[in-house]
Amino acid sequence: MKAIVVYLSTSGNTKIMAEAIASGIESKHIDVKAVSFYDVKIEDLNEADAVAVGSSTFYYRMLQPMEKFMNETLASTNPKGKLGAAFGSYGWSGEAPILIAEKMREMGMTVIDPVLRILHKPTDKDVQECKRLGVDIAEKMKQRSKAPQPQGAPG
Ligand SMILES: Cc1cc2nc3c(=O)[nH]c(=O)nc-3n(C[C@H](O)[C@H](O)[C@H](O)COP(=O)(O)O)c2cc1C
């Protein structure tokens, strides 16, 4: 089983979240990479059973290159039926993770609810919360591998 955490972060806040989520996944012995969307390889997306995507919110939406990544790169890997999670740092309105989760659902992914949003730079407590999301992703991956669900089923 493999997971990938893809992020776009302007000043490093969402990157801190991505790395903490990946460390939570890794703590459950699942092969995981946290990568900037600039460096993501199609084969890593193809091989991943779970894809977590993070972007900070700019002008009430996700950053534009991340929108392109979702619509073109991730969509081209046909992620239907995979586990998804959305996260991101924000300053006041925090729409990006919600919009990412929406796109994932449109693509038929099963998305962990609620999305994880952290105000500004993650504190130590926030980092723990991100790690917990990682653990949750790993546990859901394990459950799904034991009892495969129909594609696009909730949960
Ligand atoms: C030009 C600009 C526009 C922003 N627009 C929003 C916004 O619409 N809503 C919001 O919640 N935060 C907004 N923010 C705040 C960022 O989302 C916040 O600083 C976040 O922590 C950046 O995380 P990053 O380092 O991962 O990119 C904006 C910040 C800047 C600099």
Image (cartoon, rainbow, N blue to C red):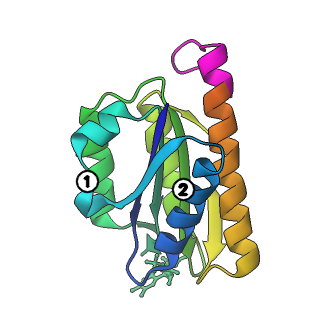
Q: Dot 2 lies on which element?
A: helix
In the rendered structure, which amino acid carries the disc numbered 2? Answer: Ala
Residue under the image location 73 percent in, 67 percent down: 128
Determine whether, in the image, residue 72 is placed left or right of residue 121: left
User: In the image, residue 116 lies at what x, y percent?
Assistant: 64, 59
- The quadrant in which residue 136 appears is top right
Q: What span is colored magenta in the figure? A: 143-155
User: In the image, residue 29 lies at what x, y percent?
Assistant: 60, 42
Neighbours of disc 1 within 10 Å: few (<14), some (14-19), many (20+): few
- The quadrant in which residue 112 appears is top right
Q: Earlier in the sequence, mark 1 or mark 2?
A: 2
User: In the image, residue 124 lies at what x, y percent?
Assistant: 72, 79
- Position of residue 61 relative to residue 68, above or below, is below
Residue 154 badge: none
Q: Dot 1 lies on which element?
A: helix
Which residue is tagged 2? 22
Residue under the image location 54 percent in, 56 percent down: 22
Relative depth, front residue between 27 and 128: 27
Relative depth, front residue between 83 and 97: 83
Relative depth, front residue between 59 and 11: 11
* Front: mark 1 or 2: 2
Residue under the image location 65 percent in, 16 percent down: 146
The answer to whether one can see residue 114 in this image is: no
In the rendered structure, which amino acid carries the disc numbered 1? Answer: Lys
Which residue is tagged 1? 68
